[in-house]
Image (tube, rainbow, N blue to C red):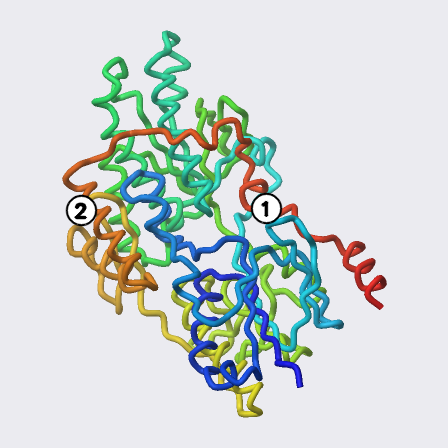
Amino acid sequence: MSAQRIVVVGAGFAGLKCVQRLERELKGELSRGEVEIVVVNPHDYMLYLPLLPQVAAGVITAQSVTVPLPRAIRTAQRLPGQVVGLDLQRKVAVVRKISEDVVDLPYDRLVIAAGSVTRQFDIPGLEEHGLGMKNLGEAAYLRDHVLSQLELANASTDPEERAARCSFVVIGGGYAGTETAACLELLTDSAMKRFPRLDPTLVKWTLVDIAPRLMPELGQRLGEEALDLLRRRGIGVRLETGVERVTDESVTLTDGSVIPTRTLVWTAGVTASPLVKMLGVELVRGRVKTGTDLRLDGYDDVFVLGDSAAIPDLTASPPGSSICPPTAQHAVRQAVVAADNVVASVRGETLREYKHHDLGLVVDLGGTQAVAHPLKLRLTGMVAQAVTRAYHLYALPLTRTRARVVFNWILHLFGGDDFIRIGFLAGRKSETSSFEETRDYLSADEMKQRSVSAS
């Protein structure tokens, strides 16, 4: 009898944790050849997203936020590629390997942990001129771009060009946007000593968000403290304001104001991977509706979790009246339940429900500044920074990865930044769709043709 194949789509927070749990719980079945696990991921690492702003700011290196899959996964087969289509009726995942070959991968059980991509809006010029912050390539590109603007401004004799190149706009007042603005503001502030011809007062960071409050999930008090801290550092914060138009030289806001700038960073939320929109199933806020056992309705062999899933929140009042937020904390814990339920389905046992109380949130504002809300405590300053960094070290999967991050923190504390542009992304277009490969999925017609050909 052939082995039952479990295919896991994605190796982010949810996917990697799920694979590790499956390897542990199915150790006997794997050794006897009764089960095989295949994880499909385009990269050979899991990316620790919360530290990306520090990569862009040069506080830590890109390698320090990656968890190597060859070390993290022991027995599961790793297929380097991207799932670009799913045929739930034939129980087949269509994979485009990194060699560009497109192959069918049959499965007995499927775990969809495809993550999320940057949420885009139909704003003129946004796709062409907006910079994302969702993966290593975008973080490296943003760092190079910011440093290049300072260099060009330093070399320019045109006052208007200098001012525009020294103006940086971040759209999105959530965690990603706030941390990006805060960390990169410290980078440009520190870099001023390397650009003696630039007036430091020219450098301006502006954080824009359509919401009435900054990071509302933190609560009003902590949100206001974070807002006050950013403003005291000279970061302009424009709330209840959106973006109307973007060009290569300016950003027009919905209040009619125009900010001359050559840099717009777009962090205004995320949406589920385009893969889930191809399933033809019910979506809730762009995510796949599942049961509390993480199974897709009507498909007992398909489990969905992480940013791709709309899972009823059993801790809400009343239970199930809302869905779990797409956070790393929930993704990791959903992965454990998903893996356990896959194992239970293999063994014919009872599945369990997902239920988790949020343990709080942490926001790194660079240097010694942070705000944190762990276990309903409100923390700011160095205490919050210590809690924030301790949480990141706890959440990183491998000891060697934690050691790299700590070493980088210490090195940056005492050695500072060299303000080097890597340059390997020079000449590449900045489009988010290119960096995040959101155009690579098969269309409905292409999937239908593959199904007909296979039959």
Spatial CA distance of label 1 from label 2 is: 35 Å
Residue corresponding to mark 2? 410
User: Which is nearer the eye, 300 or 407?
Assistant: 407
State left or right for residue 350 relative to residue 72: right
* Dot 1 or dot 2, earlier in sequence: 2
Q: Residue at x 40, y 13 (%)?
A: 160
Residue 348: x, y in percent? 58, 92
Q: Amino acid at mark 1?
A: Glu
State left or right for residue 283 relative to residue 388: right
Q: Height in image: 349 above or below 64?
A: below
Extreme residue in the top direction:
157
Q: Residue at x 67, y 86 (%)?
A: 1
State left or right for residue 303 relative to residue 331: right
Q: Height in image: 320 above or below 64?
A: below
What SS does tag 2 mark? helix
Residue 12 visible in the picture: yes
Residue corresponding to mark 1? 437
User: Which is nearer the eye, 245 or 186?
Assistant: 186
Q: Height in image: 19 above or below 205?
A: below
User: Which is nearer the eye, 286 or 17?
Assistant: 17
Q: Amino acid at mark 2?
A: Ile
Q: What quarter of the picture does the C terminus occupy?
A: bottom right
